[in-house]
Image (cartoon, rainbow, N blue to C red):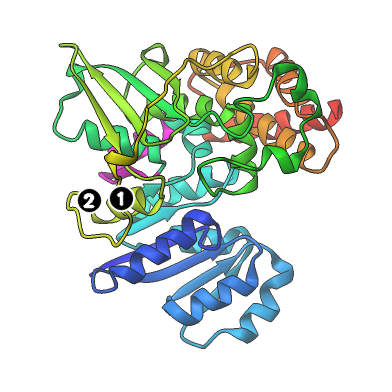
Amino acid sequence: MKTVAILGSTGSIGKNTLKVISQLKNEFEVVALAAGSNARLLVEQINRFRPRIAAIMDERKFSSLKKAIGAQTKLFVGDEGIDRVAACGADIAVMAIGGCAAAVPTLRSLEKSKRLALANKEALVMAGDIIMRKSRARGAEIIPIDSEHSAIFQCLKDEKSPSLEKIYLTGSGGPLNKTKKDALEFVSPECALRHPRWNMGRKISIDSATLMNKGFEIIEASHLFNLAPKKIEVLIHPQALIHSLVQFVDGSMLAHLGIADMRIPIQYALTYPHRMPARLKRLDFSKIKNLFFQSPDFKKFPCLGLAVAAARQKGLAPAALCAADEECVAAFLKGEIKFTAIAGIIEDVLANLKNKLKPSLEEILQVEAWAREEVRSRI
């Protein structure tokens, strides 16, 4: 039985991970849980799975949470609490913390766990070189949970790196794929949150609407699969049945197909290199009328182009991109800026960045803070 720590247990990925573990209860033991502020759900998870330790980031929820759980679980709070869970030494650490906050816990998990099941994009976007070096140095494997990168990982399982020519990252196009460019200025947060295929958190849903999510995935894939950004392309695929494709030097292509359910890549990341039965729907090809693909519209969705540019610049640019996007999305959700202002502000911040190649983690965190302040000053 393998031990599992879940960072971000009350979010979409965390909840689905616990569903998978419940179905495979003889294979995995939950030993640590960490959440942001959803104390009520964390109490339910602790009382059901009885981990050895748990943590909540929101210090205001600590006292009530401590009273509601049994003595079998040690409770911690704040950054120290997240660090405790990340460093607990579980066989598998599931990184489901959202946003830039996952960068440091990701590195901490790699120091202590044999496997990092990675659902967070921003950690690799911000500090991909450092994370991949840490993974190699510690002999800890990184198995992606993100559906597109899990698809690529599975397609490349028996292939050697030199045989890979190109990666195609597919995406549904998000909730605004059919919205006219001139109408984007008037898009409300509620409209932008209505993803047509996936049930995700608020921040990643807005990133899907702007296509920034696909841009992050390009940077993420370049690190995971050691491929130059120019060899990674995005394809809009509204049916969300093909989760990504790979092209080899002989012209052959492999694609990963399946229903849109995050429990599939989560289970694969937990059970790799084996596959285990899952009680999920199967893809019925007799009901598929067509598979549609198109190139993304970079003029309509400029965030994708900004991410591609940051991927090529490397250094501090991806970290600044990440932090600026996080602040802009938060402002949009609060109604402080228009949807179309997200790209404009990020572009302005990146234009003022003093880039540095091969930065340290400290320098990355410093530019993250700088980018946030730059966005706030513009808002």
The reply, left or right, for residue 152 in relation to residue 186 is left
Tell me the kind of residue under disc 1: Ala
Instruction: Please provide percent x and percent y for residue 250.
Output: 15, 11
Marks 1 and 2 close (CB-CB < 8 Å)? yes
Q: In this picture, is 62 found above or below 378?
A: below
Q: Is residue 292 visible?
A: yes
Residue name at image x 37 percent, y 28 percent: 290
Stretch in magenta? 129-145
Instruction: Please provide percent x and percent y for residue 61.
Output: 70, 72
Residue name at image x 85 percent, y 30 percent: 379
Residue 156 within the magenta-colored segment of the rendering: no
- The number of numbered discs placed on residues in the rendered structure image is 2
Residue 139 within the magenta-colored segment of the rendering: yes
Q: Quadrant of residue 348 in the image?
A: top right
Instruction: Please provide percent x and percent y for residue 238.
Output: 48, 30
Q: In this orientation, which residue lies closer to the viewer: 113 or 22? A: 22
| Numbered disc 1: secondary structure | helix
Which quadrant is home to the N terminus? Answer: bottom left
Residue name at image x 58 percent, y 34 percent: 208
The reply, left or right, for residue 351 in relation to residue 247 is right
Which residue is labeled 2 in the image?
272
Residue name at image x 50 percent, y 74 percent: 45
Tell me the kind of residue under disc 2: Tyr
Which residue is labeled 1 in the image?
269
Would you call the spot at circle 2 few (<14 residues within 10 Å), some (14-19), or many (20 or more)?
A: few
Q: Quadrant of residue 22 in the image?
A: bottom left
| Numbered disc 2: secondary structure | loop
